[in-house]
């Protein structure tokens, strides 16, 4: 299947990490399988953190193992440190997403250490990855939380984002993820930051991760798309929000983003109707969760023709 | 006050036309005054239709008269026909917004006549306007409903939009309004349609009127802004939706749009905090109405600096 962009599901990680109801492992796996069947090719399925910190991920090993059985799916997981990365190595996950914050205050609140200490941990992860046999090495991605603003520090200097991006690239990051952790970004800031980071990254992919806290999520997606971004994080029904970032709310709504892109002629490779139907699994698995989203409520336009050709 | 764009409030017309609870005239007038005090310079305050058709506008004359007392405010009203326009002439309203649909089916459902008959009515309005003394003539604007898609006919050909735009301009329209009546537009379509209409319109202003039915409202606003549009309709708290267009929902949220533009460095001339506070009037005047909006819930970003310099 040809696609112009890759829409990555992060609902199983960012979306539900702060939800107090435990989603049954079986439902998580159904969610992964159903989205893959709808054409989603990459899913961040869990986070390798101690269950004491985030009980929602007590089943991270089972969810990873079952996800790895899904044909053609790139399975990624969040790791806060080397210990988490080592769980990923053992499980054979395809991609590991390490995150540090550009904002010192946010990094302290989020992982209780300095940015320098987080960066050292990243280099440690890279060093350990290189000790693995070449065919066992996951792709190591680095996320720069609060790159577009911080609810503790306010505006974040673009030069700081670029400085940390350069350091992570130098250390061996194979992909950068630029998140709007607390939903502060405007399309104009997105254009500025993504252009600057891409200039630094060269051929290394730069992914966008937006939250829709202030209604600008899809406008920011278009701005990033226009700078050449081809990797976008989103979560089904707009679940999500960093538990350590006050005022953060859900990720951009996966199905709304896919609908918008398809209606613009941008191929996501995803069957929008099948994707919308996956909301039922989320509704069954987390009945108390408020599901966001416009396209599921409004329905597809009459005469809608998606850019992705649909299977019969 | 310098401004880069004009954000026009249409909540008093499009926003509440389909609301069954009658909003007290006094509350409507408070809404107009409070928004003007926040820096809004143009408000569509009512519609000159028979109260039998839209009972919400039974007080259209009082609302118009009171709005005209607000210093510096451009007061506009919707008119479906010559009779409505003549009420506007008598009241001395500054602008009249006539609307016909590009979609024949929608025009029939909306005003029970053909597009040709609507167009003849527009020419009639222009002819009567020209009979007024020059200093008593309102500005006559023409809106092309369903220009970006129709819930009866589906896609609408850009060539049809341009054809009707050309006809209305030729007939004497002094401003064109391009609405996404049922929220079908993508940013790509917005770019295409607004470029085509602006090429036809030359120096005549082209305004954008978006509904956020499918989550794309603010992304569409940015796309229109990028084509050079400087006039945008929006409604406080995202009220609205055409009562004769199935599946339509609210206009883009005024305060979210203003927040986004200001954060992009685009001056609206509006004090965002004062604007958000006007929601209280709407909440008091229509307690059963569901108010939409992100920025009022999430709050302004820490360290937010609007493009519009605020009065002390």
Image (cartoon, coloured by chain):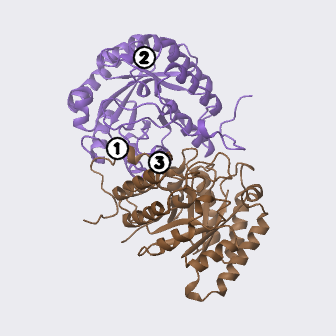
Chain colours: A purple, B brown
Q: Position of residue B122 (x, y in %)?
A: 71, 73
Where disc 1 sits, the SS reads: loop
**Is the residue at mark 2 from the same chain as the one at mark 1?**
yes
Q: Which mark is residue A148?
A: 1
Q: Find residue A78 and report its image quarter.
A: top left
Q: Nearer the viewer, mark 1 or mark 3?
A: 3
Q: Chain of mark 1?
A: A
| Whether residue A86 can be seen here | yes
Circle 3 SS class:
loop
Q: Chain of mark 3?
A: B
The mark lying in front, picked from 3 and 2, is: 3
Instruction: Name the residue nearer the viewer: B133 or B200.
Output: B133
Q: Quadrant of the N terminus of chain A?
A: top right
User: Is disc 2 surrounded by few (<14), some (14 to 19) or many (20+) residues within 10 Å?
Assistant: some
- Residue A200 image point, x, y percent: 36, 43
Instruction: Please determine whether, in this image, residue A108 is positioned above or below residue A189.
Output: above
Circle count: 3
Query: Do the numbered discs 2 and 1 sit on residues whose CB atoms are within 8 Å?
Result: no
Q: How far is disc 2 from disc 1 in space, using C-alphas? A: 31 Å
- The residue pinned by badge 3 equals B287
Decide: is B221 above or below B173: above
Q: Find residue A32 and report its horizontal and vertical position in percent.
A: 53, 20
Residue, x 39% and y 48% (percent of image)? B296
CA separation in Å, label 1 and label 3: 37 Å
Same subunit, labels 3 and 2: the answer reads no
Q: What residue is rendered at 46% in x and 14% in y?
A: A64
Residue at (22, 36) in percent of width and height: A105
- In this rendering, would A306 be left or right of A215? right
Q: CA distance from mark 3 to mark 2?
A: 36 Å
Give the labeled residue for mark 2. A22
The image's mark for residue A45 is none
């Amino acid at each position: 299947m040809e696609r112009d962009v890759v829409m990555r599901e992060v609902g199983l990680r960012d979306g539900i990490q702060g939800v107090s109801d435990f989603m049954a492992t079986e439902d998580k796996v159904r969610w992964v399988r159903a989205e893959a069947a709808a054409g989603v090719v990459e899913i961040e399925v869990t986070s390798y953190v101690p269950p004491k910190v985030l009980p929602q991920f007590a089943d991270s090993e089972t969810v990873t193992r079952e996800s790895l059985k899904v044909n053609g799916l790139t399975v990624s997981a969040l790791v806060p440190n080397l210990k988490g990365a080592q769980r990923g190595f053992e499980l054979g996950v395809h991609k590991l997403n390490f995150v540090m914050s550009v904002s010192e205050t946010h990094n302290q609140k989020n992982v209780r250490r300095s940015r320098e200490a987080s960066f050292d941990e990243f280099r440690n992860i890279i060093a350990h990855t290189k000790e693995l046999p070449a065919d066992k090495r996951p792709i190591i991605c680095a996320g720069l939380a609060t790159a577009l603003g911080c609810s503790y520090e306010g505006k974040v200097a673009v030069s700081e984002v670029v400085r940390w991006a350069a350091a992570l690239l130098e250390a061996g990051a194979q992909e950068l993820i630029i998140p709007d952790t607390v939903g502060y970004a405007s399309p104009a800031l997105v254009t500025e930051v993504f252009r600057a980071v891409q200039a630094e990254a060269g051929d290394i992919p730069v992914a966008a991760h937006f939250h829709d806290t202030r209604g600008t999520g899809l406008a920011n997606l278009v701005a990033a798309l226009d700078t050449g971004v081809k990797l976008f994080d989103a979560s089904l029904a707009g679940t999500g929000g960093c538990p350590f970032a006050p005022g953060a709310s859900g990720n951009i709504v996966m199905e709304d983003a896919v609908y918008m892109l398809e209606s613009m002629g941008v191929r996501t490779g995803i069957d929008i109707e099948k994707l919308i139907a996956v909301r039922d699994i989320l509704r069954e698995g987390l009945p108390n969760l408020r599901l966001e989203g416009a396209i599921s409520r409004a329905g597809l336009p009459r005469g809608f023709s998606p850019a992705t050709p649909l299977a019969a």
